[in-house]
Amino acid sequence: MDEQRDIRIQVPVLARVEGEGALELLARDGQIEKLQLRIFEPPRLFEKFLEGHSYSEVPDMVARICGICPVAYQMSAVQAIEQVFGTPNSDWIQSMRRAMYCGEWIQSHALHIHLLAAPDFLGFNNAIEMAQVHPEAVQRGLQLQGLGNKLISLFGGRSVHPVGACVGGFHQAPSILAVNRLRDELQAALPEAEELVRWTAGLDLPDDQQEFVSVALRHEQEYPLYGGRLVSDAGLDIAIDEYEQHFREYQESHSTSLYSLLHDKPYLVGPLARLNLNRDRLSKNLQALIDEIGLQLPSRNLFHSIIARAIETCYAIEEAVRLLDNYQIPPQSAEFIEPKAGTGYGCTEAPRGILWHRYDLDEEGLVLKSRIVPPTSQNQARIEEDLHQSLSSYGLQHTDAELRLRAESVIRNYDPCISCATHFLKIRVKRE
Amino acid sequence: MSDKPKVAVHKFASCDGCQLAFLNAGEALLSLAQQVELVHFAEAGPMNPEARVDIAFVEGSICTAHDEERIQAIRRNSQYLITIGACATAGGLQALRNLADGQQWLAEVYASPEYIDSLATSTPISHHVKVDHELWGCPVNGRQVMGAIRSLLHGAVPVVEQDKVCLECKRQLNVCVMVTKGEPCMGPVTRTGCGAICPSLGRDCYACYGPAENSNTEALGEAFRQLDVLPATIGRRFHFINSGVEPFTAAGQRWKRDE
């Protein structure tokens, strides 16, 4: 009887996700009848109000799509706009953009691992409770998060909606003294980040094997962050400006976020997808660490996302140290800009996955049209597919509270940023 | 206030960036959790949106019919209601829709706009309920939110900055970007509190902390014109992060009319 009960779970606002979303689960006769990740973050219509604004205003505007990953929005945007203008990028500008971006990965990943995800696996309601039992782990997390924020602020003056990046480069180059000081701090934090990887690998993570397609950028030498081609483990290998020929967005009545499909199927973006496709682009040190913890890649278990985030935190610290080594002030921190009309594309790896932008500009560099595809809307179809499979294999005989926790942990694996996608998921369990 | 004051953090239409003033506070977040009871803060975990609290922080603007009702309930349940950030305090960047045809915009972004619960406008919290204190900024920083809590815990009124960014630049000995580089800097009419970070990086302030008191937007617009900034561009300077608040709304409209 219990196994076949009708289940109706509604989480009106999901906790520990960024933005506002809800979950609705309906099961009858041991079968899931309806499962929806409802995103009801009010739409803010960024693509519309960008129209008529100057290219130079775009980086400060798109940052406001997301307080957690503003750098990602700025970077995809400046790339696309510079493509329209044919603006060259010096090595210095590219390296410093990557370094700033590393700051965002460190901050976002450390925040998600400690404040949002880890309480699920250690049996706490939130990080504040967790801090009473695991103070060192939480403090290490907060320190890494703070370090990421410092790295963003080095280039941007502040970590949320930083003001340093512009089309062409940076408004100002940071001083040698400030860079060297932070470089040393990052270097000193590397062992802590390596410990973080071991700590996440030691968590009691569910074993939930699933089939899915991973999509990420792939670069000739670098671990994907700022550039590359779009690839998948199902054979996709395209330039970023071919995106619209392969991916399509559609709307569902229960969500203010658009869904995205690759060749009409759900797909995964984000840390685990990047790692699945780009392990060979990591340093020898990090590859050895992956062997040490025994993580098999590619991984088909989305619960490994927390380990992937820790590995990428390590990567971002290593990479920032490398980029900031022997730092010199360049002759100019930004390229000269000459606006012209055209269409340009930008795609970078936000902490949550690929963030794709397209801008149509007029001859003065005013935005005629824009299109922005954030990682969370790309993952939305995959999250629903995952919930179907993982709740079925977990077993619907579990109590509502258990089902709800499992569902929420599954969703948090994706670190959905619902503000990006268009707010926070809330679940209420009701048995019929 | 009760022995261990209860605090809630609520979210409306926003980017979540102002809540990061808490989540990025590091150790201060943990010590805050010892001094107050965080009863509702969905992004951090605690979930009790209908609890009675001593202090409610509100992030985000009102953009849906449902949110119009939600803010009324929060007001009834809260002794002090404090808005954090440009969205809650002025409608935010998304208040740009108020100057256009918001419903038409929805139709252009979504194939089936009828599925979307959205008002034609994005409005600040003060348009709907009484607000006790407003913390300006896009985003607000940790110093502002922790300062506000500390003041209220001691029974004092939180200090809100009123100075213009120009004064902060003088204190920091920044070179003026408007005088030396001809940048259309919004510092002369913008509230400080950010630390004058834009001029410190050699660029123009874009008014993310909203209007300072007694802002002479008229004179600043004329000064921009002297710098050969086009009227439409001047209009957009005022209609940016804080387009929904006076005197920025009127100043922006004036220059857009002159286009």
Image (cartoon, grey):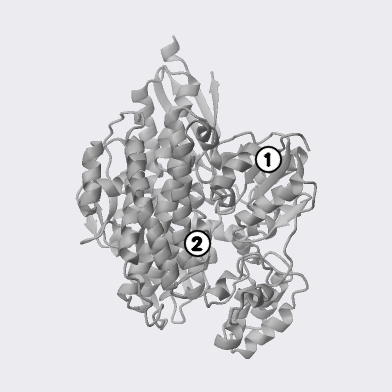
Q: Which mark is residue A36?
A: none
- Gap between marks 2 and 1 measured at Cα: 28 Å
Side of A311 relative to A46 (left or right): left
Q: Write the residue at 66% across / 52% down.
A: B145
Circle 2 chain: A
Which residue has dot 2 on it?
A63
As helix, strand or loop, the secondary structure at mark 1 comes to strand
Where in the figure is residue B143, as x and y percent of width and height?
Answer: 63, 56
Residue situated in front as seen by the camera: B81 or B5 = B5
The chain to which mark 1 is attached is B
Q: Is residue B227 above or below residue B172?
A: below
Residue A211 position, x and y percent, is 26, 36
Helix, strand or loop at disc 2?
Answer: helix
Residue type pointed to by label 1: Val
Does residue A226 appear left or right of residue B82 in this picture?
Answer: left
Observer able to see residue A47: no
For this view, does B199 lie left or right of residue A371? right
Left or right: residue A429 compared with residue A220: right
- Tell me which residue sits at (67%, 66%) in the image: B210
Pointer 1: what residue?
A: B7
Q: Quadrant of the C terminus of chain B?
A: bottom right
| B80 vs B27, nearest the viewer | B27
* Disc 1 residue crowd, few under 14, some 14–19, many 20+, Cα 10 Å: many
The quarter in which the N terminus of chain B is drawn is top right
Residue B27 percent coordinates (x, y): 55, 45
Amino acid on which disc 2 is placed: Ala
> Visible in this render: residue B188?
yes
Query: For residue A104, what is the image quadrant?
Result: bottom left
* Mark in front: 2 vs 1: 1
Q: Residues within 10 Å of mark 2 (few under 14, many from 20)?
A: many
In the figure, residue A246 lies in which quadrant?
bottom left
Residue A146 % position (x, y): 48, 52
